[in-house]
Image (spheres, coloured by chain):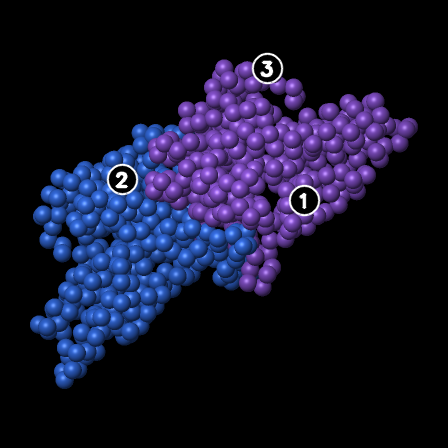
Chain colours: A blue, B purple
Amino acid sequence: MNVNGIGYRTVWLEGASVFFIEQNLLPFEFVIKESSTYIESCHAIRSMMVRGAGAIGAIAGFAMAQAVLASSENNFLEFISHAKLEIEATRPTARNLFYATEKVFNAAIKSREAAVIAAQEIANRDAADSQRIGQFGNELIREGMNIETHCNAGWLAFVDYGTALSPIYLAHEEGKKIFVYADETRPRSQGARLTAWELNQAGVPHAIIPDNAGAWLMSLGKIDMVIVGADRIAANGDTANKIGTLEKAIAAKEYGIPFYVAAPTSTFDAACPDGSSIPIEERSEDEVLYMDGVNSAGNREKILVCSPGSHAINPSFDVTPARFISGIITEKGIIKPDQQSIHQLLSHNKFI
Amino acid sequence: MNVNGIGYRTVWLEGASVFFIEQNLLPFEFVIKESSTYIESCHAIRSMMVRGAGAIGAIAGFAMAQAVLASSENNFLEFISHAKLEIEATRPTARNLFYATEKVFNAAIKSREAAVIAAQEIANRDAADSQRIGQFGNELIREGMNIETHCNAGWLAFVDYGTALSPIYLAHEEGKKIFVYADETRPRSQGARLTAWELNQAGVPHAIIPDNAGAWLMSLGKIDMVIVGADRIAANGDTANKIGTLEKAIAAKEYGIPFYVAAPTSTFDAACPDGSSIPIEERSEDEVLYMDGVNSAGNREKILVCSPGSHAINPSFDVTPARFISGIITEKGIIKPDQQSIHQLLSHNKFI
């Protein structure tokens, strides 16, 4: 996608160097960083300079390729096996990461060149899937629509295009007049920061809204569709996504507004029969109690925004039952969120 | 209510001086300020050092009494008439304010002493009504309940006790084991700041939650009841309250959780047939884009927390249709949110 008019991916490999957008600095600074060793790339994942399922998978594959390129003949297998474990330890719950290290590792057994090709393929595949999600999702978007989205499922979370935002970008490029309501998405405010930044760069008309305003705007008829991403989708269609997704889904159903989830096939977890078996990460209360941003002098600063002495509860995700979801937009088409449709999708899945 | 073990009201009159809690400094500093003239009291209302329907009504009455005490014999009526207009111009939409100035002005025609007594009565009445709301609401609270509340309808918004929090304080004092989830209530965070501060001072077990977490906690069975305040209640029971109230009400209905509104009779507006005739204030986008708090050096600071260049939409209130409300807790009892019950309540209303 374009930043200040220049096309970028979130992460890419040139020679033995990985280049990536330093996402911790966004939306206040846009900086490309270079990592010349797999150890530096591990640090980029761990410190969340690169975040989002697709982007993590891509940089993990590139890091594995960097390790392969840095290995010598005499301790080749030992060196790359050790590197693989090190890369996998950076974000142990990110499933795309393990897929990527495995694939590049196996290719490396053939040749170093094969490892690099495999790593590039992972990133290219991620971008292509996101683009296809955009094409299928775009069919749902009509001229003049107002679309609400939650959190950031844009291109920053993938290699390019994104999931929930991919149809929006395509509709906008085709000249459809649309308007996007970006939920702030407390506590980490990925909507107000990353989604708003992406939409601003792409010139898509939009406004940030407090998470509290969603149902009210729906009740006034100001929202025509909701599209969100997904962190994991169970075999019955129950969907784990950023906390607050459930509130929007319930309100959308109340007001008869279509509610879509956009996600590549790799997000489905056939091993989870339903939402109750998806583990939900509880994160630090500090994400609620403190907020960071830019002060009047232009410096990044973190401030306490809650009553001192009170504690906070910070569940990072929630599970939206399938009954609230109108459909799931995948790279293979839009499917119903039910057991049969998901089974059919996964049985033809060549991704993993 | 107690602050650091000492009993306070939000605002009170001693001689010709008004004393009040400077609410702009909360929750980071607790400071009592003295206003020795009605002009200083007007400034306290205008600058929101005193805020909340009941508290504004009380200080407006006190300010009117201050003007009466400061008047001289020769230009008495001219002086207090001018003061009345000045006080009423501070927050022109606050209905309690006009009631208070009118009542104290009329008493002043009799004597200066009568004016002071009338002003004290307004404040006492506000506190007594809040206390009665607590007694009626407390009957709904059972041992072990987890209660969610939105925004701040605590004693800081009134003279004492509050509305939504009044039953909670009474239940806690009686030794019922309860737990309160205080919604952060973006964008102004009155839940995370004022409600959490109040609950902390009163020793009520509680946690701040992101607004996004409400429906998720409900779906897990972690919330047994929701109690919120109200800014205006229409003749059919539709209730305007802080933005986000509607989302909680919809989610509560989805999960079969009782959803109560707590408000004194003065909050009902018989002239509004339903929610669609309640005007909704649109506030500055800066409340969403910027956030203030305390930095690591202990100083108050305002920082930009959203993507620069994006705009925000900031509706301050929403309207919850009566069908989502289990009951309205008033100082005269708990009523059903329907035309007939509200008509009956208001026809016996001696308040205005």
Q: Decide which of A286, B86 is in the foreground and name it.
A: A286
Q: Position of residue A117 (x, y in %)?
A: 15, 66
Q: Amino acid at mark 3?
A: Ser
A158 up-or-down from B284: above or below: below
B161 up-or-down from B335: above or below: below
Q: What residue does disc 3 label? A: B347
Chain letter of mark 2 equals A
Are discs 3 and 1 located on one and the same chain? yes
Q: Secondary structure at mark 3?
A: helix
Q: Nearer the viewer, mark 3 or mark 1?
A: 1
Judged from this view, the residue extending furthest toward the front is B175
The image quadrant of residue B330 is top right
Q: Please give the label number shown on residue A321.
A: 2
Q: Decide which of B315, B210 is in the foreground and name it.
A: B210
Quadrant of the drawing holding the N terminus of chain A: bottom left
Instruction: State how far apart marks 3 and 2 are (Cα).
Output: 46 Å
Dot 3 surroundings within 10 Å: few (below 14), some, or many (20 or more)? few
The image quadrant of residue A30 is bottom left
Q: What residue does disc 1 label? A: B7
Judged from this view, the residue extending furthest toward the bottom is A74
Of the residues under marks 3 and 1, which one precedes in the sequence?
Answer: 1
